[in-house]
Image (spheres, grey):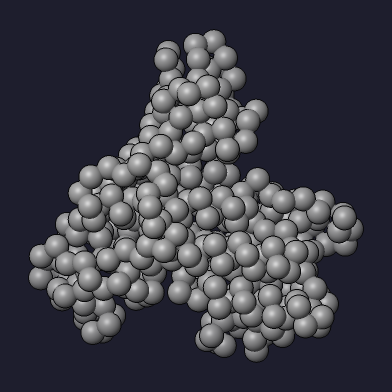
Amino acid sequence: MAHRRPLGIGFVGSGFITRFHIRSWTAVRGADIRGVWSPTRSSAEAAAALAKELDVGEARAYPSITAMVEDDAVDAIWICGRNDHRVANMEEIGAAVRSGRGRLVGVACEKPLARNAAEALRMVELAREIEVLDGYLENQVFSPAVVRGRELAWQRGASAAGRPYLARAAEEHSGPHNAWFWRGDLQGGGVLNDMMCHSVEAARFLLTDPDKPRSSLTPKRVHAQIHCLKWQRPKYADRLRRQYGDAVDYARRPAEDFARAMVEYEDDAGTPLVVEATTSWSYVGAGLRLSMELLGPEYSMRANSLDTDLELFFSRDLAQQSGEDLVEKQNAEMGLMPVLANEPVAYGYDAENRHMVDSFRRGERPRETFDDGLEVTRLLMAAYMSAELGRAVDYPPEGLDEFVPAVARGEWNPA
């Protein structure tokens, strides 16, 4: 059923990613940000104040998720809190809806859907139990460069020479902002779980025929490696402990800061296809670097987020304060610096949120759903299994849905 009035959106979580979404909302129509809940009240109030400042909704901080769901002003929830709280957040949403005191059109969840396949399955089950539309917030498949590059490669290249056969995706930066991201038990792993969820889905998206569903590609084998290349070195392990306290101890309980995986697919005609994904928390450069490639018989496409149309130069004699006003995960304030004039647009948040809102208002499931988030999680768990076994694994490997990586169990230490 179509939803005629503007949707009221409530956010679970008020940190870095929620603020990215809020900034993108200036380009979203048909929905207003009405509320924010966070375990830290002051943080929720600050995020709500940002929404008001940007004039994207009369948002307020709520004392609980339940209170936000029960408010008639809130029609859909965006889950953007910590990975280890995903299931509990969704269960509270479900309880509020089942009580009859709250009603929702839809729920959207940030990547990754969960820490492991068992938790991701529970997220899917909960969405079905309360009969809401479900959206998986994978922004990179909405990035203008990825969307337009895919469109042109398939329209002009594949139509003349045959479908593409290889997609590469990489995401690299110098490390997360918050302590819980560094902890395998809370986050579900290291950089593989945190960022390869983007890369495997973006690469899969590029390889999928635009006229066919996701199911037209079948994963056959996964081969992956993980390492802690930088942050277990004594100097950097000490830096993490000084910054975040004893809870982040990379000398004894590291998570991987580098991961690579190859996923072998077959399409519905039996054609072999390959995805190569690389992720790193050990990249030192201007800032966050996203790169995508698609290769076909007589064509290719390439996109890199640091190939910007704006650059600034600051000499060594110019006093600077550190920050991230030029590019996310910025590592320097002098020299020739690339500048992303509008990061939410470049990374796909604007288009992602417009699509989710439009889908929910039409009463339709978005093109990225919890089912897609579950499939991504399963691929990541297969990658961890491969890395632990030291060999490729056929997909799906036995025990995939019960598997918890050694990194997440605190039992992985390559030193």
The reply to whether residue 314 is in sight is: no
Residue 72, quarter of the rendered image:
bottom right
Residue 162 percent coordinates (x, y) = 50, 15
Foreground residue among 79 and 230: 79
Q: In the figure, is residue 335 to the left or right of 252?
A: right
Residue at 35 percent across and 42 percent down: it is: 394
Residue at 10 percent across and 70 percent down: it is: 234
Residue at 45 percent across and 74 percent down: it is: 84
Relative to 8, is 394 above or below?
A: above
Q: In the figure, is residue 132 to the left or right of 171?
A: right
Q: Which of the image's four quarters has the C terminus?
A: bottom left
Residue 369 percent coordinates (x, y) = 62, 53
Foreground residue among 42 and 131: 131
Residue 63, quarter of the rendered image:
bottom right
Relative to 326, is 131 above or below?
A: below
Which residue is at the far front? 398
